[in-house]
Amino acid sequence: MTRLLVPALLALSSLPAAAQDAGNGLSFGGEVKLEYVDSNSSDLVLDGDLGLTWRSGGMLGFDAALDTTYLDDGTDLTNVWAALVLSTGAGEFALGAPRPLVETMSVMPRFSSSRLVDLETGFLRGPMTSLASAQDNGVTPGITYRQASGNLTFGAGYHHLDDSNVDVVEGAMNYVSGATTFFISGEFATVPGTDFSLMQIGAFHDADRFDLGAAFAQLDASSTVHSLRLYGSYDIMSALTLRGDALLIQDASDIYSLSATYAMPSGLFVEGGGTVVNDSDEIYDIGVGFKF
C-alpha cells in the first residue's frame, strides 16, 4: 500500500488544487492522508474524508460523503453518508443517511496532527454517531434539519444504527460574532443496556495568523466524565502552522499534543507531531496528504 500511495501523493504536488465549485450547483472537497504513528506499536494509517454536494437552486438537492480510517492491521472504520436534501423556507431537511449535524457544524479542528489520536480521543468529544456508525455495517439511516437566521445556525437530527439497535438524537447551534464562533451541541443515544449522552459547549476564534479554541464536554454513561479541550495555533509563515492541543480529563490521564503542518499551494501537505499521555506515554506521528 505504501509503495503505491506515496508516489501518487507526491505526483499530486505538481497539480493545482482542485476547484471546489464544479458548476451547475455541484461542489466537492475533502482530503486524503497517509500517516505513520509510533507509540507502543507502530501503525500505518490511511485516512480519507470526501464530500459531494449538489443544489438545484430550487427545492431539491443531494449530499454525499465518505470518511474512512484504515489501519495496516486490517481495521477498517468507514462511514458512507448519502441524503436527499429538501430546501424550504422553514429550513433544510436531509433524508436518507445524512451526516450528523454535530460533525458538519463542528468548528473545532481535529485533535493533534494524527488522525489515529484524533479518532481514539473522539469518544470524549464526539460525534458519537460517526464513531458508532464506523463500526456498524452499512449506512446509518436518519433525518436532519438545519436552519440559518442571521449569525445563528441551528439544527437537529435522528440516526438509527441497525446492527447494534442504537438510536441517536442530536442537536447543534452555532452563533458567529466577528471572528469568534460560539457553539453548543448534544447527542443522546439509546443503547440496549445503557444510555449515553454527550454535551459540549465552547468557542473558537479564527484570527489572521492565530486560532484559539476551548470546549467543555460532559459524557454521561455508567458514570459522568467531564473534559476540557484547549486549542491554539499560530502561522509562522503562510505555509507553516504550529499548533498545540490539550485534553484535560476528569479523574484520568490528561493528553497534550504539539504539531506542525506545512501546506503547499497545490493542496499537498506534510504534518507531524508528538502527543504525551500522563507525562509518560509518548506518541509520534508523521504524514503526507492532499487537500482540495
Image (cartoon, rainbow, N blue to C red):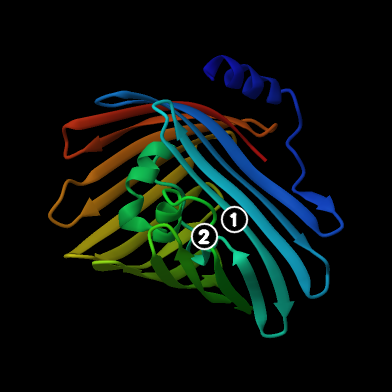
* Residue at figure coordinates x 41%, y 52% from the top left: 131
| Vertical arrangement, residue 193 with respect to residue 90, above or below | above
Q: Secondary structure at mark 1?
A: strand
Can you see residue 290? yes
**Horizontal side of residue 279 vs 44, given as left or right:** left
- Three-letter code for the amino acid on which mark 2 is drawn: Thr
- Three-letter code for the amino acid on which mark 1 is drawn: Trp
Q: Which residue is mark 2?
A: 140
* Residue at figure coordinates x 77%, y 44% from the top left: 19
Residue 175 in picture, x, y percent from top left: 52, 73
166 or 174, nearer to the observer:
166
Residue 2 in picture, x, y percent from top left: 53, 18
Q: Secondary structure at mark 2?
A: loop
Quadrant for the N terminus in the image: top right
Residue 36 in picture, x, y percent from top left: 42, 24
Can you see residue 151? no
Q: Are marks 1 and 2 in contact (CB under 8 Å)?
A: yes
Per the rendering, the mark at residue 142 is none
Per the rendering, the mark at residue 81 is 1
Q: Residue furthest top?
A: 3
User: Between disc 1 and disc 2, whose residue precedes?
Assistant: 1
